Image (tube, rainbow, N blue to C red):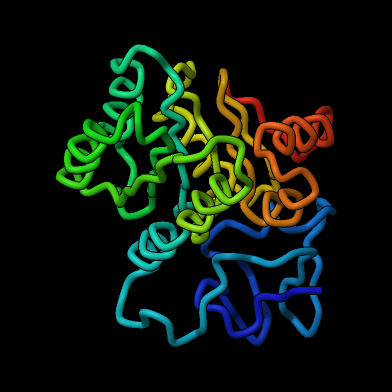
Amino acid sequence: MFNCKDCSFAKIENGHQEKCLADKYKYLQDDKDVKTEDGMFVYDRLCLYKRSAEWQKEKTTEEKLEIAREQLFPNIGICLDDDSENPEDLENIVNQIINLEYPKGKVRVVIYSFFTKAGARIPSILTKMRSAGISCSSVFIIEDKVFENETSVFKKLAESTFLTKLSSKSSVNLQKSLEEINLKFNDELKTILVFKNEDAYFINKTYVSQSYLEFQDYAKMQKSIFNKVTNTEYLHIIK
């Protein structure tokens, strides 16, 4: 059982907690009635907003909430599969990424492409993204159907909270997707493992780490994970 003891956002009066100033308690317990122990709220799972009583003590509650929220924006790892015969398809998704209204430091991109096909043009695309503040790199395929090709991609995205592998032909609204992921994961503290928007699946990285070796193929793993979470609270469809 978790509790609000010594949390910067716990409002205490006469030794008893009266309120969660971050307004997150309602998302963290299963019952409608407030549960307390030794005068403090208790809840059913980890609260990502819990901070020590001395944290940012000189700030107002509103300022502290904004700082905490910014710290909790999910890291988004994007693998862009350069699999279209039309180079403009990759450029279109890259432009979506560059124009995102989302903390640039929270987005990392790896372009996945055959060296013989794109070795000359990918560096300029990477330079374009880096100029916009996007952390990015590439993995070139020299020999097809080699296990290490994909694993090298996701090693570069190891710090991600959610991962997605996008075909350059994918239909996806990245702005809407990231806004919804942040809303559910950060603001509402939901335990969602997979977000789906059009052709794109954003999968919790821990779930990927637990599942990938069983398949050694991202597409097969993604399909299996999606089937497991379908019709459960762990899947959220972004419309």
Give left or right: position of 227 versus 197. Answer: right
Nearer the observer, 3 or 104: 104
Residue furthest top as drawn: 86
Above/below status of 171 relative to 107: above
Residue sitting at x 35%, y 25%: 93
User: Residue 64 falls in which quadrant of the image?
Assistant: bottom left
Residue sitting at x 43%, y 37%: 112
User: Residue 169 falls in which quadrant of the image?
Assistant: top left
Above/below status of 109 relative to 10: above
- How many numbered dots are placed on residues in this image? 0
Percent from the top left, x then y, of residue 68? Answer: 43, 64
Residue sitting at x 58%, y 65%: 48
Residue sitting at x 39%, y 30%: 175
Percent from the top left, x then y, of residue 16? Answer: 68, 80
Give left or right: position of 165 versus 212. Answer: left
Nearer the observer, 196 or 119: 119
Above/below status of 10 relative to 185: below
**Where the N terminus falls, by quadrant?**
bottom right
Nearer the observer, 172 or 213: 213
Percent from the top left, x then y, of residue 142? Answer: 45, 40
